[in-house]
Amino acid sequence: MQVTPRSVARALLLASPAVVVLLWFGVPQARQPAVAPVPPAGAAAPTAPGGAAVPDPAAQVAAIRPRLPEHAEQVVEYRISVRLDPTAKEVKGRERLTWRNPSGDAVPDLWFHLYLNAFKNSKSTFFKGSGGQLRGDRMPENGWGFVDIVSMKLADGTDLTKAYTFEAPDDGNADDRTVIRVPLPSAVPPGGSVTLDIEFVSKLPRVFARTGFKDDFYLVAQWFPKIGVYEPAGTRGRETGGWNCHQFHPNSEFYADFGRFEVEFTVPASFVVGATGERTARRENGDGTVTYTYVQADVHDFAWTADPNYVEQRHRFSATEDVTAEEYRQVAALLDRSDREVRLTDVEIILLLHPRHVSQAPRYLDAAKLGIKWFGLWYGRYPYKTLTVVDPAPGAGGAGGMEYPTFITGGTSFVLGQWPFNRIRAPEGVTVHEFGHQFWYGLVANNEFEEAWLDEGFNSYSTGKIMEIGYGRDTALVDFLGLRVGAVDVIRAQNAGGRYRYDTVRQPSWSYTPGSYSFYSYTKPEILLRTLEGLLGEQTMARVMRTYHERWRFRHPNSDDFYAVANEVSGQDLTWFFEQAVEGTQALDYEIASVGTRRVAKASGYLEDGGKRSLVPQEKAGDEGEGTGPFESRILVRRRGEFVAPVEIAVKFAGAAPERVNWDGHDRSKRLTFNRPGRLEWAEVDPDRTLVLDTNWLNNAQRVEPDTRVARGVATRWLFWMQQLVAGAGW
Amino acid sequence: MVTTALARGFSVARREWRLAVVLWLCGLALALVATLPAYRYLSAATASSPSADVLLQGVDVAVLAEMTAVDAGRGWLVLFATVAGLALLARIANAFFLGGIIEVLAGRRRAVAPATADPAPPAPAREAIAGRVTEFEADGLRAHEQPVPAGDLGIEREPTAATMLAGAAVAPIESPLAPVVIARREPLHPLPGAPTRRLEMVSRDDRPVMHRFFRGAGRFFLRNLVMLVLNTVLLALLAGLLFVLGRAVTKPLEDTLSVSLAWLRALLPLALGGIGAWFALMVYDYACVRLVTEDNRRPVRTWLSAIGFTARRFFPAAALWLLPGLLLAVAAVVLLAPTAGIPATTGAVLLVFVVQQLFTLARAWLRAAVVASEIEFAAAHGFITPPAA
């Protein structure tokens, strides 16, 4: 999904108190969360000594380790030939599609996406849902676009042009034109194939929501009639085979089958171009145009771009120079894989830059290399030979921050190229994120319509960790004039207060409460995966992710498939976690509700000692808290949210090292009482901050004696700025 | 002219250093009003939570967001409302402060006779001086200079500029707003061999600065406020129009391929808007200077005249702000930059506080210098004249 500099900036802004306040007041009251399974009572925190016996994950992984697939099953083959008309802003041409039936069913029809029809008029489901606005970008006036099928024939010449019908499987919108169903004269047998010749015209919209043109800049994406996915029984939990072909919604993205694309497009000779895959031919046509041919297998989409102003740079990611032998060894050990299995391959990086942004080429390049390196090391080598990074023209932000196979769009501004703004890592963040989609949407090709989190969330989790490696844990996103923002800071800020508690992570992307798609498909998944990492440990989590990727590379998993891998590799039944974090709406918030410490009073009253009774007077009121120990310290830990998870509690007494105790978290609260020689200084729940899902870390700890250093320090600076305000306005 | 006005302005500000202290104190008092609620809020939110200690290292967006979430943002709303209220209050107080500032600065009188070497004691009632003399005509409020030989001048001390020209007077000075000696028209009898004297900074108003400041502030507040309201409208219109103009002019550069032109596209509208705002601020300063020094009761007319005056002399008037602005930037770099990385220990917090107050004091003093320079500048161009008797 789109991540643009603007959206990054918005994410940062979300962390600002003002915006948070506004967001808070914009959210209705919480409903009662659903009941969900919880971890077994008495379960210890994962790091607790004496916890439940856990099978050795390494041994399990060794037993079940899959190989990293080299190629996809080729379900589709597209041969497309088109010509760009820069005056009419149209792409005209034809495609020859061969579709192979991957199922055991006889398939009587074909379903296609006509994505560009989302921009056809105000009656489309996309337009109705977006209102012409998407993620801060507004559709330009009269920026309509469409795709028309001029003709559709079977290879034997049977004309299907009049046969197809528009379908609206998601919302029944009879005016939506983004899905068609084409009945076939005869069903495609299991394992059989069908070939169609389709002539089409794509009128490009003014750039908006991932595609279109602005002046001479073209991002030609979602532009051709694209067949849906026929899911055999068993795929993603299906009981029977059938087509999966959703309408184009504002927040939903894509789902398609793997195959081979061979695309030739003709553009004016002055245009610089880039596309999915490798360029295999360039032909001068003698009429002022040039025809380029690009080919790529093992992908499920194709996009291209053209702009006479592009500055093209070609670089190389070297698997031997950009990764050290030590890094290979460390990653292999982390993942319990051989050096050979984690070995990467060289990749040609093609940068297509707007002239204003040429000085930022090193930023794009470094970020792309960072992504190729760490996504590849962790999840499996990038299997393609090229990566094209497109820097959209100024004013074409709607085309920025988008991913297509081997082809991503970034986004920056000339301002971000200058100190101190170059410390805002928007171009880097966008580039790493969009590249990361190659590994999730691209290779582990989940259904983004129905389970967007498997792409966006997994990618956000990965992106955040890689940004931390590349740019520092505390400065992963911003290191600007003293303001330091890390990846976790932003997601914590967005999660603060548990404002989002109405939807589940796993639900169709068009069904979220308006305005919350981003949280449930990006932010919360990133948080829950970081929490899972906290619970399992970094090594086990890395192996879970690696195994999931290996097992589902070039396939179509769903959430259950990930759960299964996580359970299997970790050796734990994590159902309790996924049902709350992914399938449920519970908020997680533990707090230290109160702390207190007092000297244990001496025994008083009539005391017996060796048969003698003596009256020991009570200590005077107020003496209890004074003097030397022992001290009785009481701590009340509370579970404020409905999310149940085992936690650790750390307590610190004067003159002693911190102690830790475990709590299964089942009850709403837990009282802890300690008798120690020293006073209680503080208590803290989840001291290692493993539960990133916690909506408020501020209440995770409490001191016995208040400390106003923060208030004094901040108030001092506040006073200064108030003085400057008075000086500026008053003098 | 600019250099002279600046020199005199800085000289006056140096001698009236107490004015900067008064301004600093006033600012501090107002700022404290907005700081105390902030301190209480921060203390309540962070004192018992070690998780908030990260704020000692700087801004932490996650902690701030969680603080906001805890009370549904009400604490921050209160703080923002406090800041907004303070900004509004400070803006209104501008009409108050500026009257006091000008009263103090314009009330300072001095007489400088050229070709003098040694400072003299405060002027006696009568003094023999020589030099260039500016003669004022009370009725036409016009001044002209004429050489006057050393002679016996009758000296009369006047408390304020407003009454300076009680009677036709001759001030043996270069600037009509800094006369310390008001000479009656008396026959001048040259005294051969009489020493040339320099009359060093004799204030015509011996009352404390605080007294003069608040007297002027209160006396001119409502009249200044009228002009402030008018000027706020002017500022908004001018800045807005020039910004829009800048956007329109640079529209063709929207898709430029050049980084330099892209910067021009981005900055020119802002610069033009800023210049418009700057112009309006100067208009207000000169309007107040005239109104206070003349003690007139025609704020609208005075403000209109200040527009004309400032428009005709925009560049030299703007130049008066440059040196103080530069010095302020230097002060910021010298004083504030080193405090950025200081750890938030108790001692360091105290040190930072002291440094910040020094900066604020310096800022107050530079503002006084700017106003004093503007007074000199206005006087030199005949924009202000003391009222007739």
Image (spheres, grey):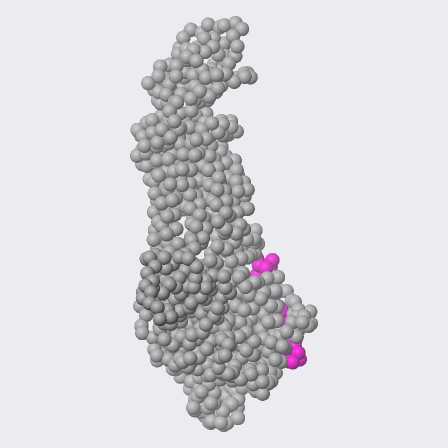
Decide whether residue A354 is among the magenta residues: yes
Answer left or right for A731 relative to B5: left
Name which residue lies at 40% across and 65% down.
A632
The residue lying toward the viewer, choosing from A466 and A680, is A680
Name which residue lies at 35% across and 20% down.
B163
Image vertical order of residue A97 relative to residue A607, above or below: below
> Which quadrant: the C terminus of chain B?
top left
Where is residue A600? Give x, y as percent.
Answer: 39, 64
Name which residue lies at 51% across and 65% down.
A657
Q: Which residues are magenta?
A: A338-360
The residue lying toward the viewer, choosing from A634 and A485, is A634
Name which residue lies at 53% across and 89% down.
A100
Where is residue B340? Give x, y as percent.
Answer: 52, 49
Image vertical order of residue B171 relative to residue B5, above or below: above
Where is residue A340? Give x, y as percent.
Answer: 66, 80
Answer left or right for B172 relative to B81: right
